[in-house]
């Protein structure tokens, strides 16, 4: 970031200093202050929404095949700056460099898919719905659309929205997480180079005041949020009350069911990566392991061994397998929830509280933690911990395991590890979750599939990514035409 970590807004094709500073942006591994994040004044949001509204008429008239040329250039620029942006993600978020690279790769995938808009956005038609009458469905953009994103994927999640929105002919406002504004700030410098006309893509930094201003601004026609469930509920209700189209992805508490016939080595390896990767701060991280039958004999032991061997440290260092959590407040909250679980009767097979990482004494580290036997009535059963904590419980049968999952208030992901096709089929058919993994620990849909959370993990109808994104960012128009031959004077 050439400006020395100054957070700026990008509005109407120009960089602007924000009106007022808010919270600090810190390096989670060191506690070092990297920047001050703006609060996000309503006037800044209004300037962005109005610039986007002015740019809309011209942008929607640009042929889709020309609009996507900006995305092809953006894809190229993201590839050229791949290592630099990955380091920035790791620096401000704390995840390992390998995880940051994985995130950016999945983000770029969305840019690639949106380049297919000339095909994806097509409507359909039928001649002679009645004699001499033809009917056509066409998709048109909505106008100004906005997205509000969380801290745990600073670049990938904004790219779940931005490429599809603008490829469909909308103009766009992004409000990234105030905890991690640096990497998207850098991506916006590349967006500027990619040649989008002024006002088509705008960046407003800020916190809740900026979100509420977006929710209330009449020019904003649709809004997407990814964040915790209470915030998702708030955004969903306020956007709907203001007549906006809205999709909100919320929090999660993901279960993984381990059958006795699962392969112990790969199952353990994959589940450890899911539970402790990104320090458990993934909405698709598994946080409850349900052993079925004799899986109880080997899985608790093998997962504890694997988790205990993970190297915790600064994500930018070679060989580190798990980084810190995002803030000191997050660390305190996670350690408090571990204490609560133990007080309620769970046994800590592995306790990550109070871990020290030499050279990083001011970092927000929580070690991998495994709690066994949490009572079903505990408050923690439905509490999203969003840290490196895996709870283990036991079920006698697959049916009992599915019933446990079905009681969860969340439905973001459910995974099963087995070598039985029949068990896999029953699980994927019956489990009430949107993203299902069979022998997969993080069932993150590719960009050309929708990201399909259910229950308290999603509020809305159309999901992010792929064809759902195209549906979300367009309105359908049906034209019914009659052109009798006798009306044409010179035919
Ligand atoms: P968060 O809810 O605190 O913040 C998300 C966004 O909402 C941020 O941009 C923030 O500025 C804004 N915000 C925060 N409080 C607000 C309020 N009261 N009113 C309006 N806007 C507000 O979430 P976070 O801590 O940044 O991210 C972690 C959460 O996101 C976890 O719950 C995680 O499960 C969830 N998440 C969900 C998905 C998914 O696909 N379902 C993906 C990633 C993260």
Image: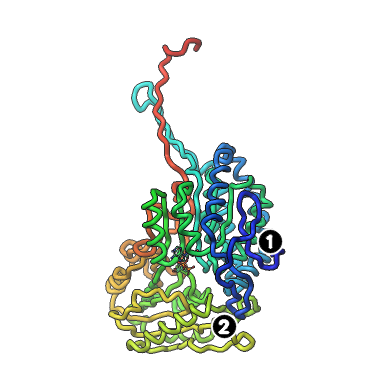
Query: Residue 307, how many percent across, how many down?
Result: 49, 83
- Under circle 1, the secondary element is loop
> Image check: 391 left or right of 87?
left
Is there CB contact under 8 Å for labels 2 and 1? no
Is residue 159 visible to us here? Answer: yes
Residue bearing the label numbered 1: 81
Query: Residue 283, how many percent across, how many down?
Result: 45, 68
User: From the Cβ of disc 1, is ligand 1 less than 8 Å away?
Assistant: no
Q: Is residue 176 above or below residue 55?
A: below
| Crowding at mark 2 (Cα within 10 Å: few <14, some 14-19, many 20+) | many
Rendering quarter of residue 317: bottom right
Residue bearing the label numbered 2: 312
Query: Residue 87, how many percent across, how many down?
Result: 65, 69
The residue lying at 40 percent from left, 85 percent from top is: 371
- Under circle 2, the secondary element is loop
> Image check: 490 left or right of 455?
right
> Image check: 16 left or right of 369?
right
Query: Residue 419, how many percent across, how many down?
Result: 40, 71
Mark on residue 416?
A: none
Rendering quarter of residue 452: bottom left
The residue lying at 43 percent from left, 13 percent from top is: 487
| Crowding at mark 1 (Cα within 10 Å: few <14, some 14-19, many 20+) | some
Nearest the viewer among 294 and 127 is 127
Rendering quarter of residue 454: bottom left
Position of the N terminus, as image quadrant, is: bottom right
Mark 2 or 1 closer to N-term?
Answer: 1
């Amino acid at each position: 970031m050439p400006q020395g970590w100054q957070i700026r807004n990008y509005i109407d094709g120009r960089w602007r200093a924000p009106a007022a500073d808010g919270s600090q942006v810190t390096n989670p591994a060191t506690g070092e202050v990297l920047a001050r994040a703006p609060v996000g004044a309503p006037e800044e949001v209004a300037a962005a929404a109005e610039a986007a509204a002015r740019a809309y008429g011209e942008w929607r008239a640009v042929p889709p095949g020309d609009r996507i040329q900006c995305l092809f250039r953006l894809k190229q620029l993201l590839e050229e700056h791949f290592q630099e942006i990955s380091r920035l993600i790791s620096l401000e978020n704390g995840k390992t460099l390998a995880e940051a690279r994985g995130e950016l790769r999945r983000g770029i995938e969305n840019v690639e898919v949106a380049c297919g808009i000339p095909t994806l956005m097509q409507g359909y038609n039928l001649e002679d719905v009645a004699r001499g009458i033809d009917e056509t469905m066409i998709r048109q953009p909505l106008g100004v659309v906005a997205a509000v994103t969380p801290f745990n994927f600073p670049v990938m999640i904004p790219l779940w929205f931005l490429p599809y929105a603008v490829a469909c002919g909308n103009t766009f406002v992004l409000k990234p997480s105030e905890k991690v504004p640096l990497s998207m700030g850098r991506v916006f410098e590349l967006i500027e180079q990619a040649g989008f006309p002024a006002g088509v893509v705008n960046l407003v930094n800020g916190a809740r005041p900026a979100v509420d201003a977006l929710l209330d601004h009449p020019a904003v026609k649709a809004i997407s949020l990814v964040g915790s469930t209470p915030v998702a509920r708030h955004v969903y209700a306020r956007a709907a009350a203001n007549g906006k189209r809205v999709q909100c992805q919320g929090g999660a508490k993901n279960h993984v069911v381990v059958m006795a016939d699962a392969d112990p080595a790969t199952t353990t390896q994959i589940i450890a990566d899911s539970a402790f990767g990104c320090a458990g701060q993934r909405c698709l991280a598994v946080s409850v392991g349900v052993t079925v039958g004799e899986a109880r004999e080997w899985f608790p032991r093998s997962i504890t061994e694997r988790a205990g061997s993970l190297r915790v440290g600064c994500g930018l260092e070679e060989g580190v397998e798990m980084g810190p959590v995002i803030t000191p407040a997050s660390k305190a909250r996670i350690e408090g929830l571990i204490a609560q679980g133990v007080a309620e009767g769970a046994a800590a097979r592995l306790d990550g509280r109070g871990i020290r990482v030499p050279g990083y004494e001011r970092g927000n580290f929580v070690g991998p933690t495994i709690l066994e036997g949490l009572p079903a009535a505990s408050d923690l059963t439905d509490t999203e911990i969003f840290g490196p904590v895996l709870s283990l419980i036991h079920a006698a049968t697959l049916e009992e395991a599915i019933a446990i999952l079905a009681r969860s208030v969340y439905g973001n992901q459910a995974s099963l590890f087995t070598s039985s096709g029949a068990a896999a089929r029953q699980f994927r058919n019956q489990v009430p979750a949107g993203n299902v993994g069979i022998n997969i620990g993080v069932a993150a849909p590719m960009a050309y599939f929708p990201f399909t959370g259910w229950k308290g993990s999603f509020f809305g109808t159309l999901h992010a990514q792929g064809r759902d994104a195209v549906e979300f960012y367009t309105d359908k128009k049906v034209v019914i035409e009659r052109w009798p031959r006798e009306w044409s004077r010179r035919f």
